[in-house]
Image: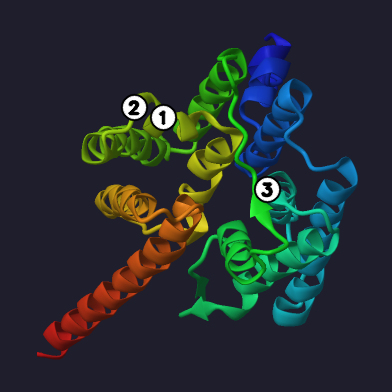
Amino acid sequence: MSASATTPMETPQWKRFVSLDNRYIGPIFITLILLVGHLSFGILESYQKTLLAIVASIGTELVLSRLFFGKWPNIASAYITGISVGILIRSPAFWPYAVCSVVSITSKYVLRVKGRHIWNPSNFGISVMLFLAAETVASLSIQWGNYLLPMVVIWVLGSVIIYRLKRFHISGLYVAAFVLFAFFRSWLTASPWQSEIAPITGPMYQLFIFFMITDPRTTVRSKTGQCITVICVALLEMVLRLNQVVYAPFYALFIVGPSAMLIEMWLDSRRASAAGATVAA
């Protein structure tokens, strides 16, 4: 009898790579966005500020996880939050990077309903900083210019990863809704449609599309609910843009995302009460 018949065959190296733990796909991909964006167009304010945001995010995660749950956490989520802050925040000072990361991670532990945090951490922290420290803090707004290759690389890899995580419908539907509403804005304001669509080609939107609106911990569970939510985000973003709100996508998700989560929790409680009443009857 051959050895292969008595012992399990070793998994090929390429298959082990492809089947990489989903927790580490996000950090790898967001690091790729950073490298492609910075090497091509210098999207980072500085390496030091980005590193400060990452360290502050991971440090806060470690401390709060021990305090609240008594265990050491997986730091992949905190790394994504920190690097997102480092990419998306713009400030001449160092302190906003640390404060934004700390606020983002703290929201996961403090702002909870029925054991779930309802805001995407980086979206919460960045929105708070843009609203409360507008004189010191701005957001990344650079586009890819006339070079499509970086955007194509990010979109291809991002689409594969999001498809693997079974959340491609969220990103794809948001893009479709954004483009549709961009044409509608163009018609309403008589502006060139190209200028209305252009923002989605920027690195800010790559992070928003692939990480913020698809965050499994802060999106509703049902596929239908996810689709409705993401369309509402795009719709509110359009309304905010028409009212000259600069950071429309962040604020739209800040409002719609938690609202959808709370509605889902309310519906779940009603179903549970109805089921309990039926059993009692």
Secondary element under disc 1, as helix, strand or loop, is helix
Along the polypeptide, which appears first: circle 2 or circle 3? 3
> Observer-nearest residue: 168 or 181?
181
Would you name the residue on which mark 3 appears?
A: 84
| 63 up-or-down from 138: above or below | below
Would residue 178 be seen by someone viewing this image from the given angle?
A: yes
Q: Residue at x 54, y 29 (%)?
A: 158
Q: Quadrant of residue 175?
A: top left
- Residue situated in front as seen by the camera: 69 or 119: 119
- Front residue of this view, candidates 133 and 160: 133
Q: Mark number for residue 278? A: none
Q: Residues within 10 Å of mark 1 (few under 14, many from 20)?
A: few
Label 2 and label 3: CA atoms lie apart by 30 Å
At label 3, which amino acid type do we have? Ser
List the residue tagged with mark 2: 192
Q: Would residue 72 be visible to someone looking at this image? A: no
Residue type, numbered disc 2 = Pro
Residue in view at x 53 percent, y 78 percent: 112
Residue at 51% x, 25% y: name it: 160
> Where's residue 28, x and y in %?
71, 34
As drawn, the label of residue 195 is: 1
Are the two marked residues, 2 and 1, in contact with CB atoms closer than 8 angstroms? yes
Task: Give the crowd class for mark 3: few <14, some 14-19, many >=20 residues within 10 Å.
Answer: many
**Residue 178's image quarter?**
top left
The image shows residue 59, relative to residue 43, as above or below, that is: below
